[in-house]
């Protein structure tokens, strides 16, 4: 039985957002062989950033977890934009960047938002290698950015 991404998203009550247009000289995603490399995604709705600030200060870890999930869905939308929707079959690698207030060390818990979403969508095929990195600033003042490598079927 093959994986049906659209059905799985519907079961979870999730909808892929529109792919945000790049704000620089790059493309949102590139397919190379069976891998789909997605540029870092920040939490956007209809092309606008939904939150700014530092996690552990003006953004709570719980809010950042949800923003991480939003970034993960945006990453999946970008991957689907360069493949057939059913072709995206799993997650290989996630890198999460978290703008961190002084002393905030909960970056892995924030990036768990993306990881948990991918596990819910793909099951075991959503289990991935991962890095969670604290940073001083991100583009547009975003508190979280998620970069993903997906696997696609032939």
Image: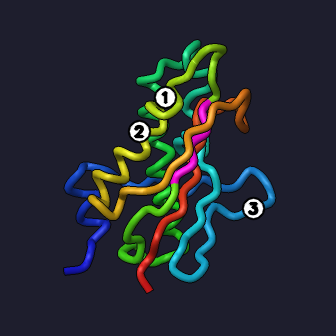
- As drawn, the label of residue 26 is 3
Say whether residue 1 is magenta.
Answer: no
Q: Where in the figure is residue 109, as x and y percent of width and height?
A: 44, 31
Q: Which residues are magenta?
A: 94-98
Q: Is residue 28 above or below residue 1?
A: above
Which callout, 3 or 2, points at the residue further toward the start of the chain?
3
Check contact, mark 2 vs mark 1: CB within 8 A.
yes
Q: Return the residue at label 2.
A: 113
Q: Main secondary structure of the magenta part?
A: strand
Q: Is residue 35 left or right of residue 135?
A: left
Q: Residue at point 56% right, 82% down?
A: 33
Q: Return the residue at label 1.
A: 64
Kindly report which numbered mark, 3 or 2, lies closer to the viewer in this rendering: 2
Q: Residue at point 56% right, 39% down?
A: 132
Which callout, 1 or 3, points at the residue further toward the start of the chain?
3
Q: Quadrant of residue 43?
A: top right
Check contact, mark 3 vs mark 2: CB within 8 A.
no
Q: Residue at point 54% right, 74% down?
A: 35
Whether residue 49 is visible, yes or no, is no
Q: Is residue 99 left or right of residue 15?
A: right
Q: Residue at point 35% right, 47% down?
A: 117
Whether residue 105 is visible, yes or no, is yes
Q: Where in the figure is residue 153, as x and y percent of width and height?
A: 41, 81
């Amino acid at each position: 039985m093959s994986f049906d991404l659209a059905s799985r998203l519907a079961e979870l009550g999730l909808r892929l957002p529109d792919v945000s247009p790049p704000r620089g000289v790059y493309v949102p995603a590139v397919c190379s062989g069976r891998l789909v490399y997605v540029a870092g995604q920040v939490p956007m709705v209809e092309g606008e950033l939904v939150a700014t600030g530092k996690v552990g200060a003006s953004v709570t870890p719980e809010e950042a977890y949800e923003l991480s999930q939003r970034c993960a869905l945006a990453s999946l939308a970008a991957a689907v934009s360069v493949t057939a929707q059913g072709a995206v079959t799993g997650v290989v690698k996630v890198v999460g960047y978290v703008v961190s207030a002084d002393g905030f060390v909960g970056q892995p818990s924030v990036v768990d938002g993306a990881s948990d979403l991918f596990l819910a969508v793909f099951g075991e095929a959503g289990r991935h290698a991962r890095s969670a990195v604290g940073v001083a600033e991100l583009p547009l003042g975003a508190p979280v950015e998620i970069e993903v490598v997906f696997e696609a079927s032939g």
